Image: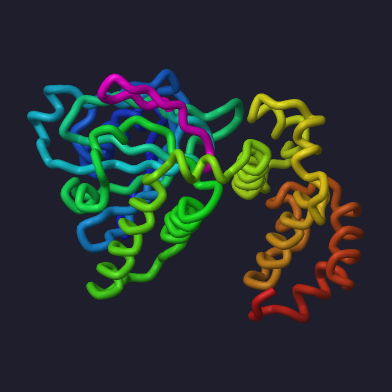
Amino acid sequence: MQRWSTRHLPPAQRFGYWREVLCEAFTALDSATTEASRFDSDVSMLPLSDIRVSAVRSSSYTIRRGAREIRKDPAEHYFCDLQISGTSIVAQNGRRAVVRPGEFFIVDTRHAYEADFLGGPGEEWKIVCLQIPRERLDAHLSMPDTLTARRFDTWAGTAALAGNFIRGLTSVNEALDEREQQTLATTLVDLLALAMTPATTRNARCNPHERDRSRVLLHIDSHLADENLGAASVAAAFGISVRYLHRLFEGADRSFARLVSEKRLQRCAADLTASGSRVSDVAYRWGFRDLTHFGRMFRRHYGMSAREWQRDHAGSTP
C-alpha cells in the first residue's frame, strides 16, 4: 500500500507537491486549482496485479492531459473513477459528463481529456480511481472508444455489485499475495465490464424514484460525520425539494430522519466496541451535537447506555 498526503507540508507548498503526486501515482498530467492557499489532499493506492486501486480525497482542482503529456508518458490505460462525494466533470472525444456520488466514468490515456474535480460547499471531493491496462478492459467491451466520458450509475443489478466491490477494495489494508491480487483483479474487470454494458437496459430497470433513493443513501453513508446532515442539506445537494426527499422514503421501513439516526448509532456502537474512546468523543465524531439526546437514543435502540455497551462489548463485533 502506497500513500501520499499534503498534510505534512506548509500550505504554500501543498499544491506543487500534489502536482508531482498526480504524475507519479497516475500518469503525466497538467493540473491547476483555485484553492492553492487552503489545498489539502491525500491518496492511498492498493496494487492488484497489473491494476491499481486508489482512494483519493482532495480539495477541488482541474487536470488536463494533452499532446505534451501523452508524449511524455505514452502508457495506455483506462482510468475509471467512482464518485464517492463531490462532483466530477469530464470531457474526452467530444463528449462531456457530469458525474455525481454513486456514478462513475472512464477515460483513455491515449487521447486528450480534461476533468474538473469539485467539492460542494464545505465538502471534500472523494473518488475511488481504478487504473486498468487498456487491453485488459478492451477484451471485455464492444466499441470501448464510445464509452469514454460517459456517466454510468451503480444503482441496480450488476452495476450495484460492481460499485460495492470497488468501494470494498478501499478497506483492504493487509498485503495481498500474487494469487489474491490476480483473483481480485479478474473479478474487478469482469464486474466493471458488466456494469458498463448494456447501460441502456440496466437504466430501464431502475426507475427514477429508485435511482434517486439510491443516490441519497450513498450520500448519507458518506456524510454521517457531518453534524449538519439533514433533510434540507441533502435536498440541496441533489437539487430536489425536501418534500420529494421524504417521498423517497415513503413505504420504506424507516423515515429519512430515523435512517440517519440509526446509521449514526451503528457507527457509534462499532467505535465503542473497537476502541477505548470516550463516549462523548464518539458521539460528536458521528454527528450528534446533544449528548443527552444521544444517550436517550442509544438506550432506546440498544436497550442499554453507551457506557454499558462499551463495557459489555469491548473486543467483540456489534
**In-front residue for pair 7/43:** 43
- For the C terminus, which image quadrant? bottom right
Residue drawn at the location 70% of the way across and 26% of the way down: 240
Residue 213 image point, x, y percent: 67, 42
Image side of residue 144 versus residue 32, left or right: left
Q: Is residue 136 magenta?
A: no
Asked if one can make out residue 8 in the rendered structure from this viewpoint, the answer is no
The reply to whether residue 86 is visible in this rendering is yes
Q: Which residues are magenta?
A: 89-102
- Majority SS type along the magenta span: strand
Name the foreground residue: 283 vs 228.
228
Depth check, front residue: 39 or 186: 186
Residue 141 in the image: x percent, y percent? 26, 47
Residue 280 image point, x, y percent: 77, 57
- Give the tally of numbered discs: 0
| Residue 133 place in picture, x, y as percent | 19, 49
Residue at x 77% of width, y 78% of height: 311
Residue 11 left/right relative to 143: right
Question: Is the residue 75 above or below the residue 87 in the image?
Answer: below
Relative to 288, is 112 above or below? above
